[in-house]
Amino acid sequence: MEIIEYNSKYDEQIKDLLVELQNYLIDIDDWHTQVMLPEYREGNFKMDMTKVKNQEGKVYLSIENNMVIGLIIGVVEEKDEIDKLTNDCVRTGDIIELIVKNNIRGKGIGKALLERIEDYFKSIDCKRINIEVFGPNRKGLNFYEKNNYIIRDMIVSKRI
C-alpha cells in the first residue's frame, strides 16, 4: 500500500468510494433521513474537488494494486463573519472526507491517511483540525477518539 497525492486517473474509483460511504451512512441512519439522489456520485465529487481547489485543499489516496482503497480530503476552513467576531480565527484544517473501503478497515489505512493530511495542515500553519462526524457513526467517532480527536462542537436534533 502506498499513499499518493490526487491523480485524476482515479476519479471514478474516488466516486465509488464516496458512494460507498454514503451507502454506509444510509444503513446506519436510525431516522432514515440520509438519502442518495441519482446525481450524488457526480455532484458530491464535484463539490469536494471545488473545495479542494478554492480552499488550499489536498487529496491523498491509498493505493494498492492500482486500486484506490482509501482517501482523505482536507481543505482550509473558510471563516465567516460570525467566526471573525467570536473566535481566535487561527487557520483551521477541515477533513471533509475520510473513507477506507469497508472490507479492509482496521488495517491502519485510515490512520496513515489521517497522519498525511495532518502533516499537510501543519506545513501550511494550521493550528487545529476539524471533522464533522454523523451522530450514528459510532465507529467513525471511536476511530477519531483513538487518534486524539475530541468532541468540541455538537449539533443536537429532535424529530418533530
Image: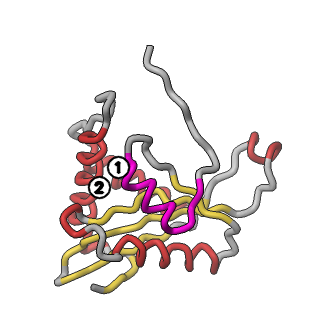
Residues rendered magenta in the picture: 137-150
Residue of label 1: 44
- Under mark 2, the amino acid is Leu
- Under mark 1, the amino acid is Asn
Tag 2 near tag 1, CB within 8 Å: yes
Vertical relation: 44 (above or below) 65: above
Residue 18's tag is: 2
What percent of the width, then of the height, locates residue 37?
Answer: 25, 36
Vertical relation: 101 (above or below) 42: below
Q: Callout 1: helix, strand or loop? A: helix
Q: Which quadrant of the rendered structure holds the C terminus?
A: top left
Vertical relation: 14 (above or below) 66: above
Main secondary structure found in the magenta portion: helix
Q: CA distance from mark 2 to mark 1?
A: 8 Å
In the image, 103 versus 96, the foreground residue is 103
What percent of the width, then of the height, locates residue 43?
Answer: 32, 47
22 in the magenta segment: no
